[in-house]
Image: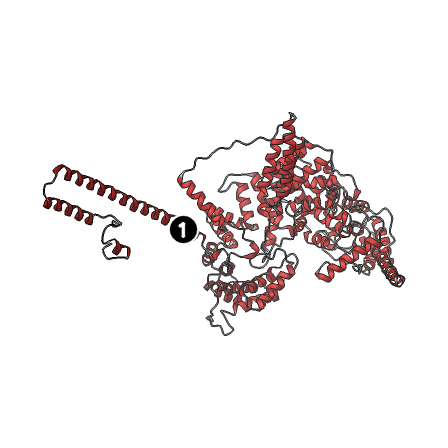
Amino acid sequence: MKSRLLRPALLFIAFFTFLFSVSALQFRGSDRPNSQKPIGDRHSSSTPPWDDWGAQTQEGQNSGWAAYNEATALLAKVRPTATPWWEFKKSGVLGTSAYYAKELFFVLFMNGPPQQQLLTTSPNAQKLGPPLRDAVKLLREAAAEHNPDALFTLAEMNFYGNYSHPRNYTEAFRRYHQLATLNGNATAQYMVGFMYATGIGGAVQQDQARAMLYHSLAAEQGEIRSAMTVAYRNYAGIATPRNCEDAVYWYRSIANRAIEYMRSGPPGGHALVRDSYRIADEHGGVYGEGASVSSSGRHADRGGVHSSRYSAFEDVVEYMDLQARKGNIELKFRLAKHNYEGSRSTPKNFLEAKKRFLEIARLYWPKDGKTKSTSLHPHDKRYPPMAAGFLGRMFLRGEGVQQNFAIAKTWFARGIEYGDQLSQYSMGLLYLHGLGVPQDAFKASTYFAAAADNNFPAAQIRMGALFLDQGDVATAIKYFELAGGHGYIEAYYYLAELTYNGVGRDKSCELGSAYYKVVSEKAEMLSTTFAEANQAYKDGDLEAALVGYMMAAEQGFEVGQVNVAYLLDQAKPRFTLNDLMPFVRKKAALASDAFLALIYWNRSAEQKNYDSLVKVGDYYLNGLGTQADPEKAAAAYQAAADSMQSAQALWNLGWMHENGIGIEQDFHLAKRHYDLALETNPREAYLPVILALYKLRLRSWWNTVTHGSVKSIQDEPVVKKEWSFSEWINDFLDAEFLNDGGGGHLDPDDYEDSPMPGGDEDYDFDDLDSEILESLIILALSGALAFLVYYRAQRQRRQEEARRQQAQAQALNQGNAGVNGGNVVAGDAQQQRQQDRGVFPDPNDPDFMNWVAGGIGH
């Protein structure tokens, strides 16, 4: 029975192995053609970039143009290699199961030599297919005749791996250098400078001075990537002394181009889409979920059981679509806005956005043109005017529809009727530029002012520009600062100009250069290829992703720097889940250049990335990419700990104090840093801190018993605070509020700025405080009243006892003065007791039972 089952299994394994081997031979050494094009090569890979090199001339036919043209015709026949069949995507239950099943099969039956590292040149020349081989031969012939296009094409093929050509960074550097020397081509000069700066692939030894030289030459010719690099190097003092004026010169030139590009778009300007993001944050940060600054403490995303935090983005969109179909106006609007703006994982869909916005707007404005009275929930009444504003914007800009200013104005007027700020701002644009209406700057300012009062950033910029034109600089700066708080590029540009030139504020080159840097980096699509690098990383092409991020890192983008350092990171734990479960490892090993990683960790740390600063300490502590230096490691940890945001840095300092590594051994200071780590991140740092404190206390006790030289843990002096009555009441109210759940975390995914059912808008926290205060006041008044009643009763009893004793004394002194006299006295005493019996009648009083039964008069 076992042999019958074993034979089919072996046949299946052999068949699977054969298919994999055949596919691997086809796929090995190939790459996606034109996977990442530089900014200077905006043309098709099969078309000569005439705009870069100049038009062909009769004289040029003798410079290898015939061979080059024939080569480009052959390259057009090269088809990109399809993704191999074993590349499963981890999406859904079946996709994830197939992915891990395939990985498990590879581990058990397909053990092979380790894969080649990134950023290296293949030591063995690979055979090329007939079209590609012939094309390369022709290109080399043309390059031998100093044909610039042939040199550029060969350099690109060897650097990026275009047309499935294997990467060869040494050959790429040689061709770029030839082209830069031949005619001073700016793109070639930029690439030579980039390769000198990074030493990528070992093609050339790092030389920052030569890198600066070639970048300066390219920047002078208008190469924006080199201009960014030169500006950043002057700004940060890399390979040159810090020079604020030079940094401002280059950043300002780039900022001018960025603003010119933004304003050259449709009314309202180009939408500057941000493609940069930290890939480490997708995994919880550099140190993982809970241990990194980006995912711990106040940055932690603590979603509740009903939060979308633990759901896939596609599932969230599907849920929103389902609820929108059921009539949820809010989710329908949010989904329409998502279609309009797009996201990193989904492209824009103007047609779908228009459809959803129109469905919402028709709740107020049906096709007959009359305003429809509808019984919407008060929370949903704001969405039809907002949808009208977006519909008008689409017609104004021609997004997904034919540009039509008249229709746009109609929708804006409808939105303005209900106070929609986007409609107010957009109507102001119509009158400011005379789009379908007579140009009227005063009327435009009226609409801008209304939108700016509603905290609309774009309108605040327009108001600031209007006040600046009128000479009211102080008011203009206030508007620009308000808009800058929302991250608008134009606001930063105006602030940079005013700050650097000292208009309306003190002149500051440092602050002005920082503003210009922000403007330049917000227009990242002009100088970087973040989108291509992100796609390459998503597709598993880590080498192409690393090159794209490295180019951005050299230009001063902190996101690019931390991404490169993360991919090159060598500070790995000794034992990880990857060691125990190899099938979860990535298919490609990362580059082993710890020195380069340390450079980018340093540059990222200088731009206020505290996780990167802790990483710098790790590298100095473990001697990665540099000689081990515990003192520098302690300095890096201390700098990160001073921010009071990194529990990891505080814990590391505690460990160094405990063991005397890099700093003086001090158990008391070690405990203090462990306590601060727990205070900074009480949730994620709880277990490691508690375990460390147990061990530390044991070592401190032993040190005390043995009279060691290390300072042991000492009790902190407790200073008893003198509480005033008002402070005691406030502290009591705060504690009562926290006990009632008032300090709970509100997940941003679970609510918006508008009131949500069950959210914080449904319950007034001020009423909660007032109710507690009223209860305390009532209790205090009730106690005071009870005390006054008790005091009055005791006083009346004492007075009655005194009068009785006085009457008895008088009777004894007078003797038997007569029965009538005695009766008179007794009668007077009884009458006096009846007139003043206090709160409660005497038990001997005949009316006592009436008082118990609620009798009248008591």
Please tell me whether mark 1 sits on a helix, a strand or a loop.
helix
753 shown above or below 832 = below
Q: How many marks are shown on the rendered structure?
A: 1
Instruction: Examine the rendered structure and indicate whether residue 285 appears above or below residue 419.
Output: above
Which of the image's four quarters has the N terminus? bottom right
Instruction: Give left or right: position of 733 versus 687.
Output: left
Provide residue 344's location: percent of width, then percent of height. 65, 56
Q: Is residue 675 visible?
A: yes
Query: In the picture provided, is 380 more to the left or to the right than 158?
Result: left
The colour mode here is secondary structure
Vertical order, 706 against 236 (above or below): above
Residue 398 on image: x %, y %: 59, 64
Q: Quadrant of the C terminus?
A: bottom left
Q: Is residue 579 above or below residue 379?
A: above
Which residue corresponds to mark 1?
770
User: Badge 1, how many Cα within 10 Å: few under 14, some, many 20+?
Assistant: few
- Asked whether residue 231 is in view, the answer is no
Left/right of residue 839 with respect to residue 444 in the rendered view: left
| Nearer to me, 194 or 841 | 841
- The amino acid beneath tag 1 is Ser
- Residue, x 26% and y 42% (percent of image)? 795
Indicate left or right for 208 with 654 as reference. right
Q: Position of residue 564 (x, y in %)?
A: 71, 45
Quadrant hosting residue 297: top right
Residue beneath the point at 56% across and 53% down: 747
Where residue 521 appears, as percent x and y from the top left, is 62, 48
